[in-house]
Image (cartoon, rainbow, N blue to C red):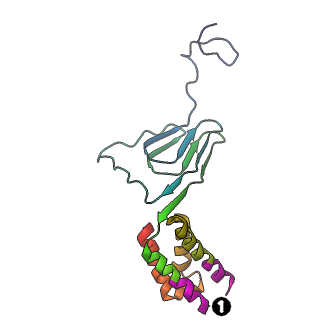
């Protein structure tokens, strides 16, 4: 037996007249985090826990060509997190958690808003908002950080007026402090 590839009927072939590589795949120019997988039933998952600001990604020089897109696949110029998969029955899951260092300004604004929530009628949405604010305070006590998605959730509730608390002046201070931390 030789090391020659086998054809579909089990006979040896020289590999020159086969169908070639299967279409699909992933071409990434610059990847600083995340997960990628290609192929049949490929699976990519990012479960990272990232603290602080995201790493600064170097910008490719002007005129640098994007990576070639693999026929039937995915071409990504820059990937700083997340998950991507290409292929038949492929799956990609981003289960990563991103944490932000909490500023003293945010903590003061959160404490003030929690104090002001007492003037509002205790509805389900006010209770949910109070629980979210408590999570920010409690997370900070343990390690000085809070989940980035929790901050976005709070900002969304307060910034668009989704709750009665959005009209409070202390809510605007929370939104401003979150925006300064998360952009």
Please indicate, yes or no, whether residue 174 appears anywhere in the rendered image: no
Residue at position x 60%, y 12% in the image: 13
The secondary structure that dominates the magenta segment is: helix
In front of the other: 57 or 20? 57
- Report helix, strand or loop for mark 1: loop
Examine the rendered structure and indicate whether residue 134 appears above or below residue 29.
Answer: below
- The 10 Å Cα crowd at callout 1, few under 14, some 14 to 19, many 20 or more, is few
Question: Does residue 113 belong to the magenta stretch?
Answer: yes
In the picture, measured across the screen, residue 1 lies left or right of residue 16, that is right
Counting from the top left corner in percent of width and height, residue 23 is at: 56, 34
Quadrant where the N terminus lies? top right
Please indicate, yes or no, whether residue 50 appears anywhere in the rendered image: yes
Residue 3, picture quadrant: top right
Residue at position x 49%, y 37% in the image: 70
Residue farthest to the left, as pictured:
62
Counting from the top left corner in percent of width and height, residue 35 is at: 54, 45
Residue 183, picture quadrant: bottom left
Total number of numbered labels?
1
- Per the rendered image, the range of residues in magenta is 112-130
In front of the other: 118 or 69? 118
Counting from the top left corner in percent of width and height, residue 139 is at: 56, 68
Residue at position x 43%, y 38% in the image: 68
Residue farthest to the bottom, as pictured:
119
Question: Does residue 50 belong to the magenta stretch?
Answer: no
In the picture, measured across the screen, residue 56 lies left or right of residue 151, that is left
Residue farthest to the top, as pictured:
1
> Which residue matches tag 1?
121
In the picture, measured across the screen, residue 49 lies left or right of residue 31, that is right
Residue at position x 55%, y 37% in the image: 24
Residue farthest to the front, as pictured:
142
Counting from the top left corner in percent of width and height, residue 4 is at: 59, 12
């Amino acid at each position: 037996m030789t090391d020659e590839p086998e054809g579909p009927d089990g006979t040896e072939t020289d590999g020159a007249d086969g169908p070639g590589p299967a279409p699909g795949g992933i071409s990434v120019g610059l990847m600083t985090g995340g997960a990628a997988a290609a192929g049949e039933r490929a699976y990519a998952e990012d479960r990272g826990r990232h603290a602080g600001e995201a790493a600064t990604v170097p910008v490719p020089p002007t005129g640098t060509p994007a990576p070639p897109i693999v026929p039937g696949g995915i071409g990504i110029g820059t990937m700083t997190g997340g998950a991507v998969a290409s292929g038949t029955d492929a799956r990609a899951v981003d289960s990563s958690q991103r944490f932000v260092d909490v500023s003293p300004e945010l903590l003061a604004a959160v404490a003030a808003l929690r104090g002001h929530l007492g003037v509002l009628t205790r509805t389900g949405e006010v209770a949910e908002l109070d629980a979210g604010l408590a999570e920010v305070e409690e997370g900070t006590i343990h390690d000085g950080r809070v989940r980035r998605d929790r901050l976005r959730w709070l900002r969304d509730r307060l910034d668009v007026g989704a709750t009665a608390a959005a009209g409070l002046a202390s809510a605007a201070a929370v939104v401003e402090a979150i925006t300064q931390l998360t952009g």
